[in-house]
């Protein structure tokens, strides 16, 4: 039975400045809403199914206050030079270095990912703060050659406004930083609505950021937190014209709703939705690398990553051998308390997720899938533990096309690279993909225009575990958004094309003559 020591919980909460009852709304160090008169929820640890602490949710009055503060904060923040904004993010990164272990532990306690992955998430925040700092001295626009004499043509990037950031439970702190740290150096202020399944991690992050806000004497309204239900706060945000951009990370059905609502008011979205990621293992693959990568990809975070490996497309020549070795590895995976060393698979997030897993196992059986290992809820445990599962499947099974947010890996036999790519691309989602091969032709085909249709394509490494330096996101029903590194920052700014005439005449573009005599020529003749 997994137990979670209450002393450990209290110590973690107190080190992060959290109490038994916490306000879920803040606009800055002196901008926390009172808890009185508000609906209160409990954050439950999936480790033992028991409450960690309580959070008072936002009401409509809180929401209005937050949006107004975020607008006011924007008027200030947009005029702070970008490199100075970068320094603030650098300080936040430094603070996160100090809090890395304890914040990582809270993430583990609140969402159940193993401690290695909990602290890994905080490291990701630190990495993105470094990236954002460098970016703050860039944010480059183009200079373009003008067709007109004595004209300068260029592009500049300007802050967008207060933006809405709605995040999922499974990366309760890192996904926020991908958005917030980049958006902050771009000059935006933000309103963050985290998942109600991970409110304490969000409050802890807000408090760490506010230490820096206070130290630098910044006004309220730059980093704003608003915890509430999707059906209230989430809906208010997606329908609110005062938030020109909604960056949404979550499930496909919810993402579709967000896309519709925001498009209706002609707002912008960055959508980071579900994945159904496949790894192709060809007959020449390095087995050790492939097995390690697939185990991490499929079992890591208990199958609750958007980039989790959900499908294994295995070449017929190595099918039996590779699969039997993978099954043996699965049998050695320790499922249990994610704070314990040696445990590789923690619990699912909640009871509902366990039910979704159970239903999927039933459907798999009905649709003719063969369970090779796993397939059971670990009933003797409190908390929400399930067995990592491998299923022999066929491409026509309906369930294989869906993202079931649990550690279930479907294995499909493939004959050659063309068939592998066809099956690979036959699902509605398009987030992450991988091929394991040392054959140049296979690898290049996989990366070609006729290859993987995903936003992320990896060779000889896992579908899971992206670095922050690249643009992160996916195609098709994954939503098309890009976050984090590369030029994803452009999503958080508005582009302005500027033409400056420094001459004494007014030549028009395309050589158009718009003939009215203003008399200048005649005057000069006199
Ligand atoms: P979810 O869709 O249930 O919730 C996501 C967020 O949406 C939460 O904050 C929730 O409160 C909010 N929400 C709910 N109803 C809303 C509404 N009506 N309006 C606005 N917001 C509303 O997703 P989840 O279970 O928290 O997360 C798991 C999903 O997220 C998976 O599908 C996973 O693949 C996806 N995900 C994608 C990425 C990516 O980068 N592509 C990253 C992490 C997670």
Image (tube, rainbow, N blue to C red):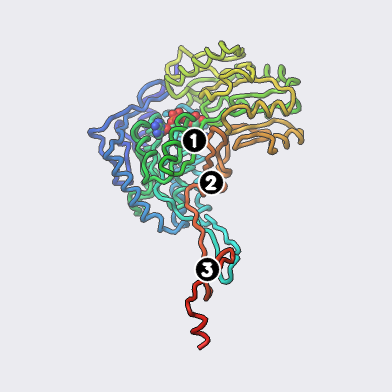
Q: Residue at 69%, 26% (x, y): give it.
A: 420
In the rendering, at what x and y percent does residue 438 appear?
75, 33
Q: Residue furthest left?
A: 37
* Nearer to us: label 1 or label 2: 2
Front: mark 2 or 3:
3
Q: Spatial distance from mark 1 to mark 2, Cα to Cα?
A: 24 Å
Residue under the image location 30 percent in, 36 percent down: 58
- Regarding residue 265, the answer to whether it shows in the image is yes
Q: Nearer the viewer, residue 517 or 153?
A: 517
Please give the name of the residue rendered at 29% of the width and 45% of the height, measured from the top-left corner: 31
Badge 1 vs badge 2, beta-carbon distance below 8 Å: no
Whether 359 is drawn above or below 238: the answer is: above
Q: CA distance from mark 1 to mark 3?
A: 65 Å
Q: Which mark is residue 119?
A: 1
**SS of the residue under disc 3:** loop
Asked if the residue at label 1 sits under 8 Å from ligand 1, the reply is no
The residue identified by callout 3 is 514
Q: Crowding at label 3, few (<14), some or many (≥20) Cα neighbours within 10 Å?
A: few
Mark toward the viewer: 1 or 3? 3
Q: Quadrant of ligand 1?
A: top left
The residue at 41%/23% (across/down) is 4
């Amino acid at each position: 039975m997994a137990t979670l020591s209450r002393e450990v919980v209290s110590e973690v909460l107190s080190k992060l400045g959290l109490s038994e009852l916490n306000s879920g709304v803040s606009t800055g160090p002196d901008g926390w809403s009172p808890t009185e008169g508000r609906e209160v929820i409990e954050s439950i640890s999936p480790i033992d199914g028991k409450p960690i602490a309580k959070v008072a949710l936002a009401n409509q009055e809180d929401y209005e206050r937050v949006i107004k503060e975020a607008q006011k904060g924007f008027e200030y923040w947009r005029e702070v030079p970008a490199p100075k904004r970068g320094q603030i993010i650098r300080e936040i990164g430094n603070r996160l270095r100090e809090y890395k272990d304890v914040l990582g532990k809270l993430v583990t306690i609140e969402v159940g990912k193993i401690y290695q992955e909990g602290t890994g998430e905080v490291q990701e925040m630190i990495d993105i703060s470094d990236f954002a700092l460098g970016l703050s001295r860039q944010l480059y626009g183009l200079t373009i050659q003008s067709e007109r004499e004595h004209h300068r043509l260029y592009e500049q990037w300007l802050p967008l406004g207060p933006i809405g950031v709605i995040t999922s439970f499974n990366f309760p702190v890192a996904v926020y930083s991908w958005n917030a740290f980049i958006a902050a150096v771009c000059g935006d202020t933000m309103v963050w609505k985290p998942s109600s399944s991970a409110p304490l991690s969000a409050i802890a992050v807000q408090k760490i950021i506010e230490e820096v806000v206070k130290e630098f004497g910044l006004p309220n309204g730059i980093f704003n937190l608003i915890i509430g239900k999707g059906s209230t706060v989430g809906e208010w945000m997606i329908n609110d014209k005062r938030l020109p951009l909604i960056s949404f990370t979550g499930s496909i059905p919810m993402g579709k709703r967000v896309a519709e609502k925001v498009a209706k008011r002609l707002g912008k979205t960055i959508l980071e939705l579900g994945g159904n990621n496949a790894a192709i293992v060809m007959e020449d693959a390095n087995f050790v690398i492939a097995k390690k990568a697939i185990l991490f990809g499929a079992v890591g975070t208990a199958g609750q990553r958007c980039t989790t490996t959900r499908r294994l497309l295995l070449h017929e020549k190595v099918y039996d051998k590779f699969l039997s070795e993978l099954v043996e590895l699965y049998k050695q995976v320790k499922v249990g308390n994610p704070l314990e060393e040696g445990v590789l698979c923690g619990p699912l997030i909640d009871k509902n997720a366990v039910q979704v897993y159970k239903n999927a196992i039933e459907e798999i059986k009905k649709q003719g899938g063969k369970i090779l290992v796993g397939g059971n809820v670990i009933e003797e445990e409190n908390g929400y533990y399930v067995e990592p599962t491998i299923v022999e499947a066929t491409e026509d099974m309906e369930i294989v096309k869906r993202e079931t947010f649990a550690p279930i890996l479907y294995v499909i036999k493939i004959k050659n690279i063309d068939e592998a790519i066809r099956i690979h691309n036959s699902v509605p989602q398009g987030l992450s993909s991988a091929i394991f091969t040392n054959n140049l032709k296979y690898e290049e085909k996989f990366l070609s225009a006729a290859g993987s249709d995903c936003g992320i394509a990896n060779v000889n490494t896992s579908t899971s575990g992206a670095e922050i330096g690249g643009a992160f996101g996916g195609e098709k029903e994954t939503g098309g958004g890009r976050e984090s590194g590369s030029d994803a920052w452009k999503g958080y700014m508005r582009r302005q094309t500027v033409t400056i005439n420094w001459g004494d005449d007014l030549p028009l573009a395309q050589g158009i003559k718009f003939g009215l005599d203003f008399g200048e020529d005649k005057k000069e003749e006199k």
